[in-house]
């Protein structure tokens, strides 16, 4: 019987390029470019100030060197910081969106015409630097829910932006967050007012199209007292030889009793079998459980990107607040992932759960990096972390870097981790029942990820399972 | 149905020879018992037939319906109708028993040129088959063998046999670890699955199982060779005299 | 302040005094190490490896080097209490890092077994010492190790020839005496077990006076094919004024076995680095550790187990109990390299916090570069199990006794792994005393 190794990447389905005329600024970064971005977006002065301040801080910062990833130096002056498809000045309805764009999203499986949409999902579609369409806006508005592009929010709801922007991830939080704060061009904004349960899944679909362009979007979700919202994001990009930078920031704020569920299926172009090309996915995601009894739950399925560097975190400030992190990260060929979470227990009786499943195949490198921090006042804090790695192929690697810092005696923190190769016994058992080796590998890997997948909204769970199967296709040579 | 000729098998990286020239013929619809003490090579024989990667055939042939099994992938063997009930069934976290069985059945059906079954059709079939081993339907939604008791695991093996309808079933120490009630249920299940088109090879240490499943032929395996073959009475004789009785036969 | 300059002066003194006595390789090794030390300096919390341990409190002291400041003559009576009762083997005593022949006895060593001072071995057995010295405790990254290497002067040298064995444990006793002010002593130990030999070694650290001091120890252990070493370290430095920094480097050859048992009872600040290289097929190591940390103490254990070759096995269990305003750090790294097929690594770190002011930082870490492995690690920080507490109380024990019993059980789990009766019994007494002391000091339970 042949052994489970040598993963063959199935051709990336989303690697096409959309031919569309773009409004692009020249590559490079300086104050003028930032002023230009801000003026293109007709931003109020406070936004420009905020950006320039972030830029100043960024100039004094250095790229982090601690992640277990390797890449050639990034020339920040060669990146295009703004690229938007040319469209009519302002869109009053979806019919006015360029048909090329509509076709693109349709091809990606995201038809934007609302009637074609699954009734339960509202979509904000972001193409390169700008949001091109948001569906179900009106319907949500009736409930007082604001769901729109970030640019629109800056125009229409400047007070909310002013209040919450940077309140969870400060502009100078880290190198990439500072860069994002200086140049971010669009993203999604969501506000759920007090007591409202958002009746449908909200989602943003991110698409990088132009070459040499960096995507720097920003997402801000605010859930007021007693409200709840479930949010999904998906991402793809064309196949290109050169690496492209995606440096996003996501901020979540949950007030008393609010619940935010944030799910990601990240399928950026991962580079080819030799590791050429692919997206550098350097993302800062953080949520704040600001109020008592609030809950923030992150679920991520990371199968794409050449390099992933992200740590969706929760600041458990309110008493009895709950933070969760469920993650599947799959790296194969030459993909690298350094991902995990931070759970900062500040309030009393706060609880966090971390469940991380890493799969490394081929030459893939997969690292879990996490911090569980219990501050002195966080009496009765609880954390449970389970962190498992599965290796397929003798050139793959899996690393686990958990930091546990406890300053309260009544806290209980437990961390468990295992690393092993895919079980030959399980493979043989499946195969002795007639299941092909390839299907057996998929089945075992999906079983390994089950506990994470079950936290995804239904439609996404199905997509995630498919995505894993596609990524593992040809698992047995 | 099955013909084994001068089979030599080594196991593991060390390459220790466990089977040293096995010859065996199993006709269609026959039930054969292979008996032997610990370390005689019984389980290696069963695993070799199923195509376990650690079993390394160095000499000989295994002909199944005229096809040579050696070199055939284990899943291909299963789709051709070879089934082994494991001595130690493997747990597969996260995959429900029902899902697993359906995937296996559809793989086998595709090979046989039959339509794949959808979830509803499959559940109908499964309900029927579960009666054979008196299995708790609640287990179907649990991950494969995870948290199953010893008896439940063995029943699950026989259930899989019932669902996959193999032409050749090899039962590797299916009686081990079972109390008498569970043994009766499992044996009754096997008896119901006997058919003129299905050959069964029972691999066992003790005569106990043969009180419930009557073999047509009994073979005694010692130190990698079949040292004696006979009818079902041989098992009783062995029970009375013990394996020491045949020690002298080993070096013939 | 303890800075590089006074170290340079002491280094010159050492060189001058020993110019004619030591072999040229040692002179050049010391120089290279000293120059590396001046580049590295002392570590700061900005470095990942020292993130949780700030050595600035120890740098406040004007330590004099023990080589500049000879110790007073001690008598056997004065150090009698440092003997482990029931231990009959050889005992080598070092005062301020320097060998004391008067206090030591090695009389009944079996043939093939050497236990001597390193300074003598450098002269009498250069062929045994030189090939191994400064090879398993690299000084390129750790300023303290570099400083120790620059001052290689004395310590223990233990050598077991091929196939030899020493049934009775060899006890190395390190005593710091500070009659005339703050002092740094830097013992350097080298333990070499040739193929097929076996031994047990105990390294104990004690103090006599009350002034500030720093023990900066380095122990190198080389285990050749099939060799087997039980290595105990009992750290009982001054909890108010003693600083203890130590690096232990272990290199294991094919099928060798290393068993270690490290217990931290004293020191205001301790930093232990235990680095084990499973450098050839089939080698095995078992690392046990226990730290009992009281008010005002900071204890930091860093371990590295590096599986370089196939079929290595490592087991690791470190536990800590903290009370008062205290701090413990555990960082355990396990590497499984590309070539290390069929490695089996298991690591557990557990911590019990008995006070509101205690803090623990733990970081178990796995870096696996081969798929044919079985690796697990676990870390936990918490308090006594409420169910167990209830169970004991339901059998009539009062709260205090129940807690003591459970806390004792938590630590005894490690202590019971000690394979020398004298050590195990002594440590168990020590543990009860530590628990009792808790109540006397009126601290939280």
Image (cartoon, rainbow, N blue to C red):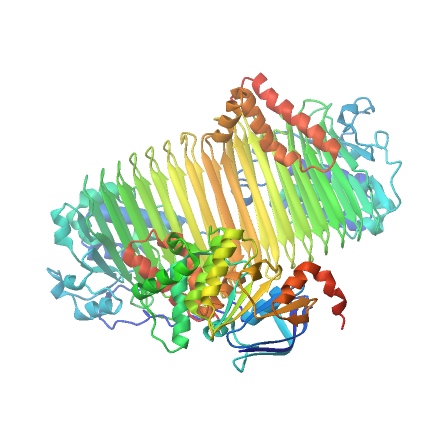
Using the rendered view, name the quadrant where residue A46 is placed. top left
Q: Nearer the viewer, residue C424 or A103?
A: C424
Using the rendered view, name the quadrant where residue A104 is placed. bottom left
Q: Nearer the viewer, residue B180 or A138?
A: B180
Q: Position of residue A274 (x, y in %)?
A: 47, 71
The total number of labels drawn is 0
Q: Is residue C299 left or right of residue C426?
A: left
Q: Position of residue C384 (x, y in %)?
A: 51, 30
Q: Residue at x 45, y 51 (%)?
A: A64
Q: Nearer the viewer, residue B75 or C211?
A: B75
Q: Quadrant of the N terminus of chain C?
A: top right
Q: Residue furthest front?
A: B233
Q: Residue at x 67, y 28 (%)?
A: C428
Q: Is residue A371 above or below residue B215?
A: above
Q: Position of residue A199 (x, y in %)?
A: 19, 49
Q: Is residue A70 left or right of residue C171?
A: left
Q: Is residue B101 above or below residue C167?
A: below
Residue A221 seen in the current view: yes
Q: Position of residue C34 (x, y in %)?
A: 69, 45
């Amino acid at each position: 019987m042949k052994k489970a190794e040598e993963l063959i990447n199935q051709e990336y389905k989303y690697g096409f390029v959309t031919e569309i005329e773009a409004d692009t600024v020249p590559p490079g970064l300086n104050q003028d470019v930032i002023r230009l971005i801000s003026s293109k977006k007709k931003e109020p002065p406070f936004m420009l100030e905020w950006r320039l301040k972030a830029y100043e801080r960024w100039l004094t910062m250095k790229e982090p060197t601690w992640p277990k990833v390797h890449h050639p130096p990034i020339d920040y002056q060669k990146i295009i910081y703004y690229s938007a498809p040319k469209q009519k000045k302002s869109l009053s309805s979806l019919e006015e969106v360029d048909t090329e764009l509509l076709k693109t999203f349709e091809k990606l499986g995201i038809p934007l015409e609302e009637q074609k949409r699954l009734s339960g999902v509202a979509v904000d579609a972001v193409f390169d630097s700008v949001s091109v369409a948001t569906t179900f806006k009106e319907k949500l508005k009736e409930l007082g829910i604001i769901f729109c592009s970030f640019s629109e929010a800056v125009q229409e709801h400047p007070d909310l932006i002013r209040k919450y922007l940077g309140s969870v991830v400060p502009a100078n939080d880290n190198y990439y967050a500072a860069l994002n704060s200086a140049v971010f061009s669009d993203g999604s904004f969501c506000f759920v007012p007090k007591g409202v349960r958002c009746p449908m899944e909200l989602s943003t679909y991110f698409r990088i199209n132009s070459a040499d362009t960096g995507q720097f979007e920003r997402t801000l979700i605010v859930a007021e007292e007693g409200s709840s919202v479930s949010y999904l994001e998906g991402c793809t990009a064309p196949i290109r030889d050169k690496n492209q930078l995606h440096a996003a920031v996501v901020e979540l704020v949950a007030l008393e009793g609010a619940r935010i569920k944030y799910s990601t299926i990240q399928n950026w172009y991962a580079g080819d079998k030799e590791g050429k090309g692919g997206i550098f996915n350097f993302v800062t995601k953080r949520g704040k459980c600001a109020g008592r009894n609030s809950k923030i739950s992150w679920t991520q399925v990371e199968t794409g990107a050449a390099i992933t560097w992200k740590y969706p975190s929760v600041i458990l400030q309110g008493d009895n607040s709950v933070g969760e992190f469920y993650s599947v990260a799959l790296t194969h060929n030459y993909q690298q992932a350094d991902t995990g979470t931070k759970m900062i227990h500040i309030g009393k009786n706060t609880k966090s759960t971390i469940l991380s499943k890493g799969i490394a195949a081929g030459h893939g490198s997969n690292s879990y990096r996490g911090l569980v921090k219990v501050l002195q006042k966080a009496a009765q804090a609880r954390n449970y972390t389970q962190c498992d790695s599965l290796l397929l192929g003798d050139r793959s690697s899996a690393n686990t870097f958990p930091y546990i810092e406890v300053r309260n005696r009544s806290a209980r923190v437990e961390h468990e981790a295992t690393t092993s190769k895919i079980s030959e016994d399980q493979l043989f058992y499946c195969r002795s029942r007639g299941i092909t080796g390839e299907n057996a590998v998929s089945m075992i890997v999906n079983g390994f990820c089950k506990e994470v997948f079950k936290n995804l909204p239904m439609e996404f769970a199905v997509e995630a399972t498919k995505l894993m199967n596609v990524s593992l296709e040809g698992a047995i040579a | 149905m099955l013909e084994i000729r001068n089979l030599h098998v080594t196991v593991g990286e060390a390459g220790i020879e466990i089977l040293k020239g096995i010859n065996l013929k199993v006709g269609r619809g026959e039930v054969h018992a292979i008996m032997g003490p610990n370390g005689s090579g019984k389980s290696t024989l069963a695993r070799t037939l199923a195509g376990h990667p650690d079993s390394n055939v160095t000499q000989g042939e295994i002909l199944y319906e005229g096809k040579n099994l050696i070199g055939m992938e284990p899943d291909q063997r299963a789709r051709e109708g070879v089934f082994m009930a494991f001595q130690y069934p493997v747990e597969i976290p996260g995959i429900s028993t029902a899902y697993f069985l359906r995937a296996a059945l559809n793989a086998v059906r595709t090979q046989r040129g039959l339509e794949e079954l959808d979830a509803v059709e499959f559940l109908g079939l499964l309900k029927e088959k579960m009666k054979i081993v008196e299995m708790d339907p609640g287990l179907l939604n649990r991950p494969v063998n995870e948290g199953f008791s010893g008896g439940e695991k063995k029943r699950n093996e026989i259930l899989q046999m019932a669902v996959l309808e193999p032409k050749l079933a090899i039962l590797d120490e299916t009686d081990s670890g079972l109390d008498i009630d569970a043994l009766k249920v499992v044996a009754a299940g096997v008896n119901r699955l006997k058919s003129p088109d299905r050959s069964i090879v029972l691999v066992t240490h003790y005569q106990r199982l043969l009180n419930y499943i009557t073999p047509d032929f009994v073979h005694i395996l010692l130190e990698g060779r079949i040292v004696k073959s006979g009818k079902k009475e041989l098992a009783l004789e062995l029970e009375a005299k013990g394996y020491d009785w045949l020690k002298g036969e080993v070096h013939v | 302040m303890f800075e590089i300059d006074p170290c340079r002066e002491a280094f010159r003194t050492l060189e001058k005094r020993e110019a004619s006595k030591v072999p040229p390789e040692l002179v050049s090794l010391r120089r290279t190490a000293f120059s590396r030390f001046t580049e590295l300096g002392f570590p700061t919390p900005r470095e990942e490896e020292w993130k949780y341990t700030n050595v600035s409190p120890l740098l406040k002291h004007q330590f004099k080097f023990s080589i500049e400041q000879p110790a007073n003559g001690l008598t056997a009576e004065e150090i009698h209490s440092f003997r482990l009762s029931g231990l009959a083997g050889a005992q080598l005593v070092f005062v301020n890092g320097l060998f004391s022949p008067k206090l030591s006895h090695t009389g009944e060593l079996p043939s093939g077994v050497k236990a001597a001072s390193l300074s003598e071995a450098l002269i009498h057995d250069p062929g045994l010492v030189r090939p191994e010295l400064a090879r398993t405790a690299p000084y390129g990254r750790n300023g303290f190790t570099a400083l120790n290497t620059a001052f290689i002067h004395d310590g223990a040298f233990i050598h077991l020839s091929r196939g030899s064995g020493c049934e009775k444990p060899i006890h190395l006793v390190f005593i710091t005496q500070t009659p005339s002010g703050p002092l740094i002593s830097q013992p350097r130990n080298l333990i070499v077990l040739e193929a097929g030999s076996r031994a047990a070694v105990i390294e104990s650290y004690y103090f006599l006076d009350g002034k500030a001091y720093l023990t900066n120890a380095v122990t190198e252990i080389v285990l050749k094919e099939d060799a087997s070493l039980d290595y105990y370290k009992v750290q009982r430095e001054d909890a108010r004024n003693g600083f203890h920094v130590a690096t232990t480097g272990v290199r294991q050859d094919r099928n060798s076995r290393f068993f270690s048992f490290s217990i931290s009872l004293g020191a205001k600040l301790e930093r232990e680095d235990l680095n084990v290289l499973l450098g050839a097929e089939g080698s095995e190591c078992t690392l046990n550790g226990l730290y009992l940390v009281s008010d005002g103490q900071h204890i930091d254990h860093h371990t590295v187990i590096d599986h370089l070759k196939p079929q290595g096995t490592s087991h690791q269990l470190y536990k800590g109990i903290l009370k008062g305003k205290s701090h413990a750090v555990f960082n355990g790294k396990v590497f499984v390299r590309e070539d290390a097929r069929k490695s089996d690594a298991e690591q557990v770190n557990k911590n019990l916090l008995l006070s509101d002011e205690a803090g623990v930082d733990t970081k178990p870490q796995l870096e696996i570069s081969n798929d044919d492995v079985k690796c697990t690690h676990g870390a936990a920080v918490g308090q006594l199990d409420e169910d167990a507490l209830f169970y004991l109380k339901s059998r009539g024990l009062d709260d205090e006794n129940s807690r003591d019993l459970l806390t004792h059980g938590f630590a005894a789990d490690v202590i019971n792994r000690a394979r020398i009766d004298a050590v195990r019994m002594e440590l168990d007494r020590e543990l009860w005393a530590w628990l009792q002391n808790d109540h006397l000091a009126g601290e939280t339970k």
